[in-house]
């Protein structure tokens, strides 16, 4: 078989291998506590499901415009304008089959081979995959433990910028750390983007998965909407991961290019699902609120237990459904010095299945601490209590 050379540069989400391992362990009759999944075990609100069924019955089963149905583009533009304090209209919105496609399309639209792209590491692994696949030069930046949450390693961002740096990927409300930019961090990033003429992908997948306070966007800062594309998704807020619907939102010139990619890739996003998304944005919000209440209870349960474990330190992020505890001392205590051994031993001894820092990028030079990532979107509170109770007994035993 002669596979094209570029495929050697295409990455993947290694977290799927953790899922496979956990499934194999469960198939042997073992109890598994699934903290590895970024997926949700919460069903989509009933009014959204009903709207999809109605749209199907109404014949919305054919192709629709490449950038999405006008009603959804308009409504989403208004929604995102109101929450970010930016003025978007429908020509700034291209509906996508999920949030994820915006990553590759943004990079293809704005990066030439050899251009440098700043992206988070640890971070969502698809950034690095897409940068390398399309011939870019990846510049990873990390996060530092602050007082209350992780903070951007701003020095790593600033010192790596050269005349070849074209793009910055920012995932505020971050997977896997739960990090959230302060207004000072936003201002510094905007200053750098303007000074070095960087275009920015604002991956805001978790903008609405928030338990306290208000989310804000780098795109809202002066001069930034003109050079930013927002990755929007219906996946998380409305528990619609499997429906596959999201959007790229940004300057018309870029959105036109992305729409041309839609023509080439998928023609249009699923037609009837766009009516369901419209119901999500404009209909009864009670069930969407309940999703947040469920997630908040899970977060608090998990954080409280984790922080009671000797050698574990965990922040309580205001948004996302991820935790990224520092387990350096806990691993030392168990005599484990390797991520993979720790993860596999934990699964075997307790059934607790987690991802580690290495599922979110290669460890960077000088990294001394060890972290695991727990997602609480796919596990109920009672199971969190039981699983993390076993985790505590294992570490302290
Ligand atoms: N961006 C981040 C940071 C994510 O964590 C995810 C999903 O886990 C996505 C984008 C894409 O999600 P979707 O394609 O379901 O919208």
Image: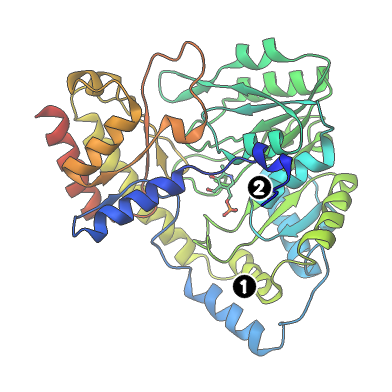
Ligand 1 within 8 angstroms of badge 2 C-beta = no
Relative side of 140 to 27, left or right: right
Mark 2 and mark 1 lie on one chain; the one further toward the N terminus is: 2
Relative side of 29 to 186, left or right: left
Q: Nearer the viewer, residue 14 or 239?
A: 14
As drawn, 396 above or below 156: below
As drawn, 200 above or below 266: above
Q: Which mark is residue 265?
A: none
- Residue 288: x, y in percent? 48, 62
Relative side of 127 to 268, left or right: left
Quarter of the figure with the C terminus: top left
Color style of the picture? rainbow
Answer with the quarter of the image where residue 73 lies: bottom right
Answer with the quarter of the image where residue 354 lies: top left
- Residue 96: x, y in percent? 71, 58
- How packed mark 2 is, by other alpha carbons closer than 10 Å (few <14, some 14-19, many 20 or more), is some
Residue receiving disc 1:
276
Relative side of 200 to 311, left or right: right
Disc 2/disc 1 C-alpha distance (Å): 21 Å
- Residue 139: x, y in percent? 67, 22
As drawn, 282 above or below 128: below
Residue receiving disc 2:
83
| Residue 47 shows up from this direction | yes
Q: Nearer the viewer, residue 244 or 116?
A: 116
- Residue 237: x, y in percent? 52, 56
- For marks 2 and 1, give the one nearer the viewer: 1
Assign a secondary structure to mark 2. helix
Kindly identify the residue that appears in the image at 53 percent across and 76 percent down: 49
Answer with the quarter of the image where residue 392 lies: top left
| Residue 177 shows up from this direction | no
Kindly identify the residue that appears in the image at 76 percent across and 47 percent down: 105
Kindly identify the residue that appears in the image at 69 percent across and 13 percent down: 160
């Amino acid at each position: 078989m002669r596979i094209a050379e570029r495929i050697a540069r295409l990455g993947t989400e290694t977290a799927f291998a953790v899922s496979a391992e956990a499934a194999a362990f469960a198939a042997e009759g073992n109890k598994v506590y699934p903290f590895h999944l970024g997926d949700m075990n919460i069903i989509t609100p009933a009014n959204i499901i009903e709207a999809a069924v109605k749209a199907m019955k109404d014949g919305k089963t054919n192709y629709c415009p490449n950038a999405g149905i006008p009603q959804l583009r308009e409504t989403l533009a208004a929604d995102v304008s109101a929450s970010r304090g930016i003025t978007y209209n429908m020509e700034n919105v291209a509906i996508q089959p999920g949030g994820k496609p915006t990553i590759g399309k943004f990079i293809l639209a704005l990066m030439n081979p050899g251009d440098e792209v700043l992206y988070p590491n640890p971070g969502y692994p698809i950034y690095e995959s897409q940068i390398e696949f399309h011939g870019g030069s990846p510049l990873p930046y990390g996060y530092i433990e602050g007082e209350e949450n992780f903070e951007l390693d701003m020095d790593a961002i600033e010192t790596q910028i050269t005349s070849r740096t074209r793009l910055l990927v920012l995932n505020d409300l971050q997977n896997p750390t739960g990090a959230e930019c302060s207004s000072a961090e936003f201002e510094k990033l905007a200053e750098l983007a303007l000074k070095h003429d960087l275009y920015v992908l604002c991956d805001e997948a978790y903008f609405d998965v928030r338990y306290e306070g208000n989310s804000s966007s780098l795109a809202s800062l002066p001069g930034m909407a003109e050079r930013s594309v927002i990755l929007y998704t219906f996946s998380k807020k409305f528990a619609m991961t499997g429906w596959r619907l999201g959007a790229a939102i940004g300057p018309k010139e870029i959105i036109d290019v992305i729409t041309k990619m839609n023509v080439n890739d998928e023609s249009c996003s699923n037609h009837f699902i766009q009516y369901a998304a419209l119901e999500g944005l404009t209909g009864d919000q009670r069930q969407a609120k309940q999703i947040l209440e469920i997630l908040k209870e899970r977060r608090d349960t998990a954080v409280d237990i984790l922080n009671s474990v000797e050698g574990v330190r965990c922040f309580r992020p205001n948004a996302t459904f991820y935790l990224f505890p520092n387990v350096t001392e806990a691993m030392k205590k168990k005599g484990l010095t390797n991520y993979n051994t720790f993860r596999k031993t934990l699964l075997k001894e307790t059934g607790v299945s987690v991802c580690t820092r290495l599922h979110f990028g290669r460890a960077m030079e000088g990294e001394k601490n060890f972290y695991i990532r727990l997602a609480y979107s796919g596990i109920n509170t009672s199971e969190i209590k039981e699983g993390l109770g076993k985790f505590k007994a294992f570490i302290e035993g």
